[in-house]
């Protein structure tokens, strides 16, 4: 029995053209856009991304230097006492679950991958604490692989305001964005939207006057 191929979503050509023009404008507005999580290599980025759930990147960047100094490799973190990890990541919130996840991920990396972070979506999703968003962050920023689009609160909000999607579920938003932009732009798209979302296009009282996207933005849901 053969599996049925999932049909691709029909994308309005005009919407695609408008979306890509907005991307070009964002690229001009934020030429230095990049991953805001400080890291040195795939393992540090993986851990930092797990810690970033329900926490600011600024806080994570404060927490990770002493964490990585104490446990610089997956092998060291896999051997860490859970209480020590909890103490080091406590200020990121949900620290017990996060400590369990980063230790568990390190153990799987050591046991199943020879100490190297896996480079596929399938294998990353098998790691404790890793969902599609985290996997996309690691694949796109650590390995340069555009497998999907990172959809956080900023990306989801701006995608709706710009009229790119009517969806609210991150997976459905991601699928819509993947249909609008070329694969090579998927990782950077998230960075650009996050920069804009942290700037003028805030959740409350967005600063539309003077926004570089004002003429291109339908401002869906914005009064």
Image: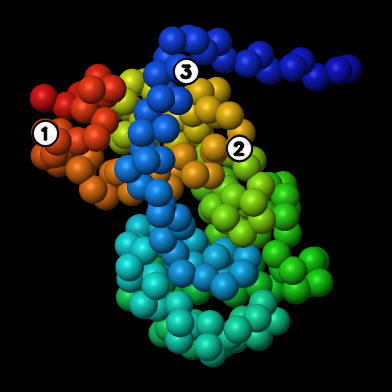
Image height of 114 relative to 165, above or below = below
Q: Nearer the viewer, residue 189 or 43?
A: 189
Q: Earlier in the sequence, mark 1 or mark 3?
A: 3
In which image quadrant can residue 53 be found? bottom left
Image: 88 above or below 5: below
Q: Quadrant of the C terminus?
A: top left
Q: From this viewpoint, is residue 98 visible? A: no
- Residue 134 % position (x, y): 54, 53
Question: Does residue 61 show up?
Answer: yes
Mark 3 secondary-structure assignment: helix
Q: Secondary structure at mark 2?
A: helix
Q: Nearer the viewer, residue 101 or 44?
A: 44
Tell me residue 18's x, y (percent). Answer: 40, 19
| Mark 1–mark 3 distance (CA, rounded to whole Å) | 25 Å
Outermost residue to the right: 1
3 left or right of 100? right
- Mark 3 crowdedness (10 Å alpha carbons): few <14, some 14-19, many ≥20: some
Residue bearing the label numbered 1: 209
Q: Nearer the viewer, residue 218 or 96?
A: 218
- In the picture, measured across the screen, residue 222 lies left or right of residue 122, that is left
Report which residue position mark 3 lands on.
Answer: 16
Q: Which residue is rendered at x = 57% and y = 64% of the image? A: 46
Nearest to N terminus: mark 1 or mark 2: 2
Q: Earlier in the sequence, mark 2 or mark 3?
A: 3
C-alpha gap between disc 1 and disc 2: 31 Å
Badge 2 is on which residue? 184
């Amino acid at each position: 029995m053969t599996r049925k191929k999932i049909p691709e979503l029909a994308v309005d050509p005009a919407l695609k053209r408008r979306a890509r023009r907005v991307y070009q404008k964002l690229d001009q507005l934020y030429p230095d856009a990049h991953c805001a999580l400080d890291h040195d290599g795939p393992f540090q980025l993986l851990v930092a991304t797990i810690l970033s759930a329900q926490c600011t990147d600024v806080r994570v960047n404060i927490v990770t230097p002493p964490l990585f100094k104490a446990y610089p490799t997956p092998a060291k973190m896999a051997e860490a006492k859970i209480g020590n990890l909890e103490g080091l990541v406590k200020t990121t919130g949900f620290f017990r679950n996060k400590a369990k996840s980063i230790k568990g991920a390190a153990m799987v990396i050591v046991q199943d991958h020879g100490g190297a972070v896996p480079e596929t979506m399938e294998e990353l999703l098998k790691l404790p604490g890793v969902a599609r968003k985290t996997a996309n962050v690691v694949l796109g920023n650590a390995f340069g692989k555009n497998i999907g689009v990172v959809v956080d609160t900023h990306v989801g909000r701006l995608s709706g305001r710009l009229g790119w999607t009517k969806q609210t579920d991150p997976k459905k938003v991601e699928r819509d964005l993947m249909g609008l932009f070329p694969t090579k732009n998927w990782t950077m798209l998230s960075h650009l939207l996050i920069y804009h979302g942290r700037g003028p296009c805030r959740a409350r009282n967005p600063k539309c006057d003077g926004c570089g996207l004002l003429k291109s933005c339908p401002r869906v849901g914005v009064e």
